Structures are given as structure tokens and as C-alpha cells.
Image (cartoon, grey):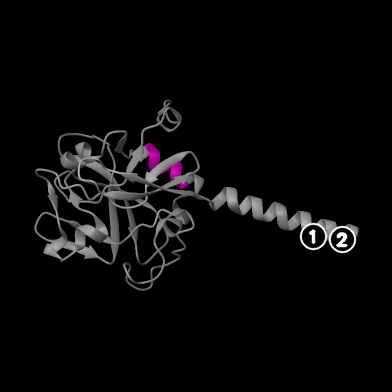
């Protein structure tokens, strides 16, 4: 093998390895024993996330978007913050701001992370679904929100509760939009209805941000 050929082979191997470690993920599954629902899971770096929105029906504080048929099957439920804080199954918890910051940093920062988190195409997301690659395997869908007076943004945006407990009325959510590839963080009222992505409880991930 010539030196040039060896160099090209080595370059392809290194490039492939870097791409795998930067954007690769491990897919799995989890069964919620409370209702028997099977969820996809995805490991991104050292975090294990549900690969779908939570679809556990709580006694109160959860809604189906405008009573859309099969909405919960596809998008999960929309939860108030109080319901979301208690909705994750045993061994899992509501994701924190720190979890999202860690995920964003791993995916290249807020400006890049949104596109890597969004499902591709325009089945869930309205056009243009800007910069969507889903290279993280997170497969975020445009599940919309339940606001004070109406439900809106189905197809246009996704909002995910964090466990941030600023005060009795306010928390934070992570947000994605069809019109850009950014990951945003918004302060919002706890009475609103947003999607939930649980993260697996782990000594490794739960201690990453002990210094915050």
C-alpha cells in the first residue's frame, strides 16, 4: 500500500470516528410499567433520554391538543409544570436546565443544537423546518402548547418543561421552532401546557452540574 493510499485510509477512518463520536447515539427502549407503554430511548453522550414525548395520563394537569384524534399517540400529552414535575416514571426525572445546557453544548451550542434535535421533513414540522437533521436521534416533534386561553403552534414549535422552580408561578422551558435551527430557553408560566422529555437518573449525569 502506497503512502498516499495509507494516508487516505487513515483520514477516512479518523473522519468517520469523529463523526460517530460527535453525532452518534445509542437507541434503546423502555417500558413504563404504569400503563405498559413502550418508549424509544436515545443515549446522547452520557445522557439517556426518552426518544419520544411522555404520554402518561396524569389525574389532572394534562391535555390533548384541541382534542386532535391520536394526538397523544404521536405527540404525548401537554402537561402543566406541576403535573410534569411528577409525571416521569420510576428511574427517570423531569429534565433540568442543566441537562439541556449540557446537551446543547455537546451538539455545538444553542445556535446549532435545535436543528440536530428536530425530526426531519414536514410530516410533523411545517415548512421550512429550518436546518433539521435529527443527527442527535432526539426526534423532537412540533407538539405545540396549551396557553392560558387556547392551544397553538402545532406544527410550528415544540416546548419542553424543565424542573426549574423559580417561584410559585414561573419556570423555564426549552423551545424549538420550524423557522430556525436554534435551541431557545424561555421563562414561562407554570400553568401552561408543554411536552415532557424525561431523562434517566444516573450518578454520572446528575453530578455533571453539581457546581451550579
State the predominant SS element of the stretch in magenta.
Answer: helix
Along the viewing direction, whichever of 155 and 71 lies nearer the viewer: 71
Q: Position of residue 6 (x, y in %)?
A: 84, 56
Question: Label 2's element?
Answer: helix
Q: Is residue 17 left or right of residue 205?
A: right
Queried whether the magenta region covers residue 114, the answer comes back as no
Q: Counting other residues with Cα less than 10 Å from the Cα at mark 1, is it few (<14), some (14-19), or many (20 or more)?
A: few
Secondary structure at numbered mark 1: helix
Horizontally, residue 2 falls left or right of residue 47, namely right
Above or below residue 209? Residue 121 is below
Q: Residue at x 29, y 57 (%)?
A: 158
**Residue at point 36%, 67% (across, down):** 179
Numbered circle sitting on residue 134: none
Could you tell me which quadrant the N terminus lies in?
Answer: bottom right
| Residue sitting nearer the eye, 98 or 69 | 69
Q: Mark 2 highlights which residue?
A: 4
Q: Is residue 208 left or right of residue 56?
A: right
20 or 211: nearer the viewer:
20
Name which residue lies at 27% across and 37% down. 163
C-alpha distance separating marks 2 and 1: 6 Å
Q: Residue 9's x, y, as percent?
A: 78, 58
Task: Name the residue: 64% across, 50% down.
Answer: 18
Q: Nearer the viewer, residue 35 or 66?
A: 35
Residue 101 is a magenta residue: yes
User: Magenta region: which residues?
Assistant: 98-104
The residue tagged 1 is: 8
x%, y% of residue 38?
30, 49
Report if the CB atoms under discs 2 and 1 are less than 8 Å apart. Answer: yes
Above or below residue 140? Residue 61 is above
Amino acid at each position: 500500500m502506497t503512502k498516499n493510499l495509507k494516508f487516505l485510509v487513515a483520514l477516512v477512518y479518523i473522519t468517520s470516528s469523529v463523526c460517530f463520536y460527535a453525532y452518534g447515539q445509542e437507541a434503546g427502549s423502555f417500558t413504563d410499567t404504569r400503563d405498559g407503554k413502550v418508549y424509544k430511548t436515545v443515549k446522547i453522550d452520557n445522557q439517556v433520554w426518552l426518544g419520544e414525548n411522555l404520554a402518561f395520563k396524569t389525574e389532572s394537569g394534562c391535555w390533548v391538543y384541541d382534542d386532535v384524534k391520536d394526538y397523544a399517540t404521536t405527540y404525548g400529552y401537554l402537561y402543566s409544570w406541576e403535573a410534569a414535575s411528577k409525571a416521569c416514571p420510576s428511574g427517570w426525572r423531569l429534565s433540568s436546565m442543566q441537562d439541556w445546557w449540557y446537551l446543547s453544548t455537546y451538539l455545538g451550542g444553542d445556535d446549532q443544537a435545535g436543528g440536530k434535535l428536530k425530526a426531519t421533513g414536514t410530516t410533523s414540522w411545517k415548512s421550512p423546518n429550518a436546518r433539521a437533521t435529527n443527527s442527535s436521534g432526539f426526534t423532537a416533534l412540533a407538539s405545540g402548547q396549551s396557553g392560558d386561553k387556547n392551544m397553538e403552534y402545532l406544527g410550528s414549535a415544540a416546548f419542553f418543561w424543565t424542573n426549574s422552580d423559580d417561584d410559585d408561578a414561573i419556570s423555564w422551558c426549552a423551545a424549538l421552532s420550524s423557522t430556525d435551527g436554534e435551541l431557545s430557553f424561555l421563562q414561562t408560566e407554570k400553568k401552561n401546557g408543554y411536552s415532557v422529555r424525561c431523562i434517566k437518573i444516573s450518578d454520572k449525569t446528575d453530578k455533571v452540574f453539581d457546581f451550579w
